[in-house]
Amino acid sequence: MTPVLGLADAVRAHVRPGTRVYLGNFGAQLFCVGHEVIRQGVRDVDLVIASGGLLMDQLLGAGVLRSATFGHCWSPVGPAPAHNFRRAAEGGAPVALHEMSLGLLTAALTAGAWGVPFLPVPDRAGTGYVDEDWTRGLLDTATCRFGTSRVVRAEVPDVAFVHADLADADGNGVVRGPLGEVVVAAQAARAVVLVAEELAPAETVRAAGITIPGLLVSAVVHHPGALAPDGALGRYDRDVAAYERYARRAATPEGFRSWLEEEVLT
């Protein structure tokens, strides 16, 4: 049986300064994990996240991150910017920002899962990834007797927190919604913590179709509402008012700190 941990215990066991943390599936913002990292006061985390959204914005504002490798960081409700991200990008904050497309990030995680140092990727000459080095050193070229190719460096998180709709006692998980890069992220990571909306019997999980096999999973966290204020397919809707409130209050550093104190730290 895979151990079932409380959220605080799972974060305490797997996240410390210098940890490389994959956080959430594409389109699934694991706010519960990010907020617990903030509450525990962990610093110098290296974040890997496909859809950074407002979760990455909050981790930046709270001073958690040393670096972020991400697909995007924006608010899906608005139009409203991710204010902390904008301040970090424009103000030269001491956080290394490595921007990648979802395809590049998936290839990097695939290389990590396969145990190879890099993976060839289609060239995207004329884009900011290549011409302006938005990835900040994660792309290169490799030449062999078969030719020359753009390559992306392998990504190997120390721990992957993966959102699942269902999990069973053996750690098998069912992911609903877009899979994106989540399966190769689980395969690439040194440890996987499944954050599940519901614990279910093994036969129910098998019938639903196992996405993440238990042999990859180190621990399960049972946490209904794990994505709130974001929504989970078939479970609960996004809290649009909460997103709008955050956008207003995070417009200034003082407003963000007040929001953080009232809605995360208390």
Image (cartoon, rainbow, N blue to C red):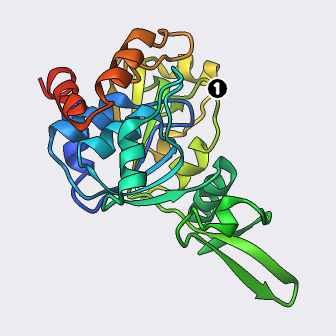
List the residue tagged with mark 1: 209
Q: Quadrant of residue 130?
A: bottom right
Residue 243: give x, y in percent of width and height. 41, 19
- Decide if residue 28 is in sight here: yes
The residue at 46%/37% (across/down) is 24
Q: Is residue 154 above or below residue 57?
A: below
Report the residue that reaches farthest toward the right.
146
Residue closest to the far left: 266
Q: Which residue is depicted at the point 36% across and 51% down?
A: 88
| Residue 115 placement: quadrant | bottom right
Q: Looking at the picture, tell me which residue is in the foreground, 81 or 227.
A: 81
Measured from the top left, where is residue 198 in percent x and y? 41, 17
Direction from residue 29 to residue 63 in the image, left or right: left
* Percent of width and height locating residue 56: 40, 41
Where residue 174 appears, as percent x and y from the top left, is 55, 27
Instruction: Give the amino acid at mark 1.
Output: Gly
Q: Residue furthest bottom?
A: 145
Q: Residue at x 60, y 50 (%)?
A: 184
Label count reads 1
The one of 13 and 45 positioned closer to us in this rendering: 45
Q: Quadrant of residue 152?
A: bottom right
Q: Where the N terminus falls, by quadrant?
A: top left
Relative to 245, say whether 264 is above or below: below
Q: Is residue 247 above or below residue 219?
A: above
Q: Residues within 10 Å of mark 1 (few under 14, many from 20)?
A: some
Work out which quarter of the rendered image holds the C terminus and state it. Answer: top left
- Residue 2 visible at all: no
User: In the figure, 73 relative to 101: above or below?
Assistant: above
Residue at x-position 50% and y-position 35%: 74
Q: Secondary structure at mark 1?
A: loop
